[in-house]
Amino acid sequence: MNETPKLNSFRSGPDEDGRFGIFGGRFVAETLMPLILDLQAEWDNAKTDPTFKAEMDTLGKHYIGRPSPLYFAERLTEHLGGAKIYFKREELNHTGSHKINNCIGQILLAKRMGKTRIIAETGAGQHGVATATVCARFGLPCVVYMGATDVARQSPNVFRMKLLGAEVKPVTAGNGTLKDAMNEAMRDWVTNVDSTYYLIGTAAGMHPYPEMVRDFQSVIGIEARAQMLEAEGRLPDLVIAAVGGGSNAIGIFHPFLDDESVKIVGVEAGGKGLEGDEHCASITAGAPGVLHGNRTYLLQDGDGQIKEGHSISAGLDYPGIGPEHAWLANVGRVEYVPIKDDEALEAFQLLTRLEGIIPALEPSHALAEIIKRAPKMGKDEIILMNLSGRGDKDIFTVGKILGMGQAGE
Amino acid sequence: MTARMDKKFADLASEGRPALVTYIMGGDPDFETSLAIMKALPSAGSDIIELGMPFSDPMADGPAIQMAGQRALKAGQTLGKTLELARRFRQDDPDTPIVLMGYYNPIYIYGVDRFLKDAVDVGLDGLIVVDLPPEMDDELCLPALEAGISFIRLATPTTDDRRLPKVLENTSGFVYYVSMNGITGSALPDPSLVGAAVRRIKSHTSLPVCVGFGVKTEEHARAIGAAADGVVVGTAIVNQIASSLTAEGHATEATVPGVAALVRGLSAGTKAARLAAAE
Ligand SMILES: Cc1ncc(COP(=O)(O)O)c(C=O)c1O
């Protein structure tokens, strides 16, 4: 009876308290507890309700444009001279990223719960745009909290949100990035619990959000797995994605977790390097702590104060990570590595020139890791990357760094 | 719960008046001034002191307490120094209960066992940890009770009769009724609604019920005090401190006396509450 229990699946979490090992949980103010329990009940209900699934599928197909294609990047593969590289093209979704998959699911839940107002936090603005979009589609008022720094560096998305009818509230606390936006959204939520649904944009926060967002995003991995089997007759050798809070990554990882032959790599924002504080590599350089409703890896000082972090990519500029990733790192199923700002920028340019696809800066981090790995892999090996979003929102940031001046100059 | 907290509420009951519970942020605007403010509180009429532990991400607090935390952190406050504040205070004041209030992460990083040992050593009486609901009692609440430190729980308007027993289960010291959904610094709620809520909670527990959120003036303290066993004032005190500081956020000669004057007024309010309740 002294045997260590054998872990026979990496896909069974979380437990009923929302834990993945020591990570996850429900670390929230009492005001929110009844609401979170209600959400849990509604979600448990919806999960097994065929009408809910049918609604999701219909909207997925006709509104988002699913399934998204699996694309063989022939010229990039040739250029790097090693493994075959495939992209799961989430950037072709309506609104330009994977974020819409989750927003459709959650807004249907909010409707079921009778909520009349939607709030969200956003970093890159992709989640804000996706939320504003579904709010327009379902006729609900929408308030998006966005760090003031991000409002400035992702201005095209701010404009889109406003056009869609959302109110964008800039948050000046801290560095004015995603963490601060999330604090402010939580303050709004406790103040307006009765009417308001908090549409969290990543697989983080308090239970049941990490599980729920993962399940909504798993459509990415489920489709990609089937598409890969069809295209190549076998599973990929390496699956790779960028990790901010971790929703696009867990979405593509989860269906592959129990496939032993598949190596899985998550790419964190290495910012200006891990030596100082200017990065967002929570797993590589952080420690377990409690923030925003869950225990996870956090960038923090010795007194438990959360650090601000830095990334060129607003969507990765968060000092924490979803709890399931923290657990997957701990048990060793997924490897997490940092990629620096300049490496991501190079990858951004390479993909743009070689494949005619302008990627967002977030997945450019995953691409930079592929640039390192593909040449060392055999030509018969296969890499699958989640191309989580398109780069339209980033062209001004990148253009400025590359010294291209203003358009039309 | 500690004998000190017990005795305090027993004394108040025999005086027939509600407690005045005052909140300050530990280390705001700096360690020494904060200690001086803390020492001035009991003689100004504060019955129980809530000592805030600054945190970088105070998700349940409004702008005033957020800024107080930022000032304290900037001046170098840490959880260790907040415990030290309590220890220095306790050297001259054996009677006034001290409740630490804040968020879990700094305690988690300090180490729960080490924290509770030090909390007992410095003479703390209770803890309010905003982001630890009953579902998370294994983390800190149960070990704290074991160590003889009260775990004071917040009840809110969303805590309905179905949920109240769970919230009250491991609560000790007193129940802190947050009189409205929202963050600290919100507007004053309707005292008659507060009275009904307090009666509802009291039908589930024999613990004293203190009410906070929105109390700013002597008149508020009297009105809310007539309906509860205690009145908690935080944002008004923190604002008083903020308004006394230099542009760079440093303490001035007006800082400590300003707080003392405000608390004397609030205390007159809670003392008058007995008369109001008897009317
Ligand atoms: C295109 C894109 N990819 C990735 C991310 C990071 O989020 P997550 O880790 O939740 O996928 C974002 C966030 O804004 C994004 O816009």
Image (tube, coloured by chain):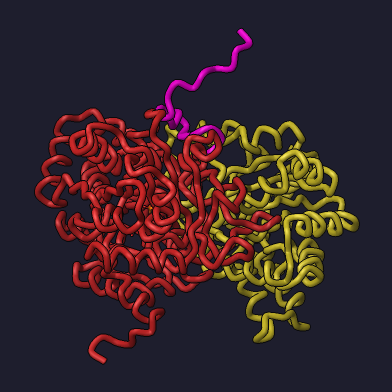
- Residues A164 and A99: in front is A99
Inspect the magenta stretch and tell me whether residue A7 lies in it: yes
Which residue is at a point 82% across and 47% down the rendered structure image?
B123
Residue A218 appears left or right of B219: left
Q: Residue furthest bottom?
A: A409
Q: Position of residue A186 (x, y in %)?
A: 43, 56
Residue B186 in view in this figure: no
Which residue is at a point 59% across and 70% down the rendered structure image?
B67
Give the residues drawn in magenta, as a range: A1-23
- Residues B216 and B76: in front is B76
Q: Main secondary structure of the magenta part?
A: loop
Residue A114 appears left or right of A185: left
Residue B111 appears left or right of A316: right
Which residue is at a point 23% across and 70% down the rendered structure image?
A160
Look at chain A in the picture and name its colour: red
The quadrant of the picture occupied by the N terminus of chain B is top right
Look at chain B in the picture and name its colour: yellow
Inspect the magenta stretch and tell me whether residue A153 lies in it: no
Q: Position of residue A50 (x, y in %)?
A: 16, 30
